[in-house]
Image: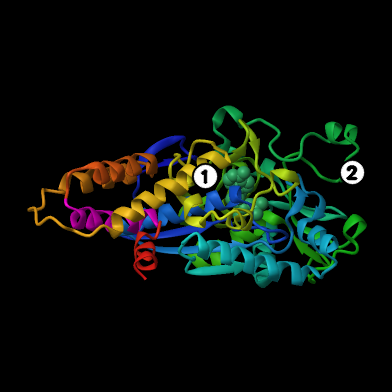
């Protein structure tokens, strides 16, 4: 099977580090609000990837984190912790916010027929591991301390920015230069050495002196930076080397670039062999769906309008994961109608006793499409070719059921519901 690897900017033959097993880590949600359907697009991609790997006989060990501390409003280590923002908005504790939105996310996952990871890992339950990792980086000379924070020194990691592609290597990836930030009125830590340096540990001082979640550490009372959680949790549950790491494209420039820097500096090993990134769901031609404003559509918004969550899954599968997908209500309605048609085929009775034709070529075509960098639009085209073919209904149903193991559209459940 082939996968597009952001790290090499090529479609590559997939070969895990150990035969037949895949260690897969996915950056999970920041639980300060409902997930929007853009976020959920990324998790449908992860699920499709898992199902394709399984159908290619790999055993997948999948870990997904829950970010419940340290993710600040700006990726450039600035602003409020998103969890604190959510708590203020709803006049609840950060712990209540985290618990509530973790549960709503898990419920979305279930409604979309996404197979849960083998392990969910919470950042706040891995503080010890994160502190240990920062200590390791400190011992190896990759970090330095200011009066406000402990930073990773990006000048010590020659491959910094490789995930962005070589031509972008010298860009200011994270925070921007000190002078541009000063001009924008952003507080600058004058002891920060390089603009791309990022926080490993925030001290509970200055603007974070009242931060609710805090733990003691060798650098004083505080809380971990966002990036360190994923390195620490993936290492403790999957080991120092991953086969595949996933996320949305917005993670490439900062979060994943920083995960690579700190993980590889700590272990001396390649952090992940493959990096798979999903493109955005957009509103209009380019506006990224974000957790603010009217742009913010949740799965609940859809179900309230009578849309089955699986119709959204169908819509997502109709676009390639590396292409932007522009959300419209019309396309969602078309997706729901298409799914209904498939379900009708699943409930057709088989009147004819025609001898079944050879169905192998459809199956081969489907397998080839999904193994070619998860080409789900092509796979759906094969599904429609089966539906339009002259095959007897029971043969169509057998093929569709097999295809559904990868598509996850629950043709089976629809069949039961309709026949009740
Ligand atoms: P967050 O909860 O903000 O940490 O994001 C969860 C996941 O959703 C991350 O992998 C993001 O990269 C991804 N994501 C954020 N916005 C979008 C979008 N509009 N379309 C697709 N994925 C997104
Ligand atoms: Zn992450």
Considering only order in the chain, which callout, 1 or 2, is on the residue closer to the N terminus? 2
Residue 6: x percent and y percent? 49, 40
Q: Nearer the viewer, residue 198 or 110?
A: 110
Residue 262 shows in the view: no
> Which residue is at 50% across, 36% downward?
323
Q: How far, Cα to Cα, is label 2 from label 1? A: 44 Å
Q: Which residues are magenta?
A: 392-408
- Would the CB of label 1 be found within 8 Å of ligand 1? no
Residue 249: x percent and y percent? 57, 41
Residue 332, numbered circle: 1
- Is residue 231 found left or right of 316 in the rendered image? right
Residue 101: x percent and y percent? 68, 65
Q: Judging from the image, what secondary structure is the residue with disc 2 in?
A: loop
- Looking at the image, is mark 2 or mark 1 nearer the viewer? 1
Q: Nearer the viewer, residue 245 or 404?
A: 404
Q: Is residue 1 magenta?
A: no
- Is residue 229 found left or right of 81 in the rendered image? left
Q: Which colour scheme appears in the figure?
A: rainbow
**Crowd around label 2: few <14 · some 14–19 · many ≥20 (10 Å):** few
**What secondary structure is the stretch in magenta mostly built from?**
helix
> Which residue is at 75% across, 72% downward?
96
- Is residue 149 found left or right of 115 in the rendered image? right
Q: Nearer the viewer, residue 95 or 283?
A: 283
Ligand 2 sits in which quadrant?
bottom right
Q: Judging from the image, what secondary structure is the residue with disc 1 in?
A: helix
Q: Residue furthest left?
A: 355
> Which residue is at 65% across, 43% downward?
289
**Crowd around label 1: few <14 · some 14–19 · many ≥20 (10 Å):** many
Q: Residue furthest front?
A: 351
Locate the C terminus and report the quarter of the image it occupies: bottom left
Q: Which residue is mark 2?
A: 187
Q: Quadrant of residue 19?
A: bottom left
């Amino acid at each position: 099977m082939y996968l597009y690897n952001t790290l090499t900017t090529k479609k590559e033959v997939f070969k895990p580090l150990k035969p037949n097993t895949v260690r897969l880590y996915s950056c999970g949600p920041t639980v300060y609000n409902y997930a929007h359907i853009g976020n959920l697009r990324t998790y449908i991609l992860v699920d499709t990837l898992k199902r394709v790997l399984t159908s290619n006989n790999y055993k997948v060990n999948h870990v997904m984190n829950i970010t419940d501390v340290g993710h600040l409003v700006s990726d450039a280590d600035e602003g409020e912790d998103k969890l604190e923002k959510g708590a203020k908005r709803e006049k609840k504790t950060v712990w209540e916010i985290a618990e509530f939105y973790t549960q709503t996310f898990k419920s979305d996952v279930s409604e979309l027929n996404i197979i849960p990871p083998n392990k969910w890992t919470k950042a706040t339950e891995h503080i010890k591991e994160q502190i240990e990792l920062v200590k390791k980086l400190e011992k190896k000379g990759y970090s330095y301390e200011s009066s406000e924070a402990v930073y990773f020194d990006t000048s010590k990691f020659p491959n910094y920015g490789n995930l962005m592609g070589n031509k972008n290597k010298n860009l200011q990836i994270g925070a921007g230069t000190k002078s541009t930030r000063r001009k924008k009125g952003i507080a600058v830590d004058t002891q920060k050495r390089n603009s791309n340096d990022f926080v490993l540990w925030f001290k509970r001082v200055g603007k974070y002196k009242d931060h609710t979640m805090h733990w003691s550490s060798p650098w004083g009372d505080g809380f971990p930076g966002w990036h360190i959680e994923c390195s620490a949790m993936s290492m403790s549950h999957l080991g120092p080397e991953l086969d595949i790491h996933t996320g949305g494209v917005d993670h490439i420039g900062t979060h994943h670039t920083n995960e690579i820097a700190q993980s590889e500096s700590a272990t001396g090993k390649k952090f992940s062999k493959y990096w798979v990134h999903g493109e955005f769901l957009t509103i209009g031609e380019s506006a990224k769906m974000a957790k603010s404003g009217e742009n913010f559509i949740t799965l609940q918004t859809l179900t309230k309008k009578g849309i089955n969550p699986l119709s959204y899954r169908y819509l997502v599968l109709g676009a390639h994961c590396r292409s932007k997908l522009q959300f419209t209500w019309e396309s969602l309605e078309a997706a729901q109608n298409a799914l209904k048609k498939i379900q009708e085929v699943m409930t057709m009775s088989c009147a004819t006793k025609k001898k079944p034709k050879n169905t192998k070529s459809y199956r081969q075509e489907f397998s080839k499409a999904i193994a070619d960098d998860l080409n789900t639009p092509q796979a759906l085209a094969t599904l429609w070719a089966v539906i339009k073919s002259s095959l007897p209904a029971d043969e169509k149903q057998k093929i569709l059921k097999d295809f559904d193991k990868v598509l996850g559209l629950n043709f089976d459940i629809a069949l039961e519901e309709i026949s009740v």
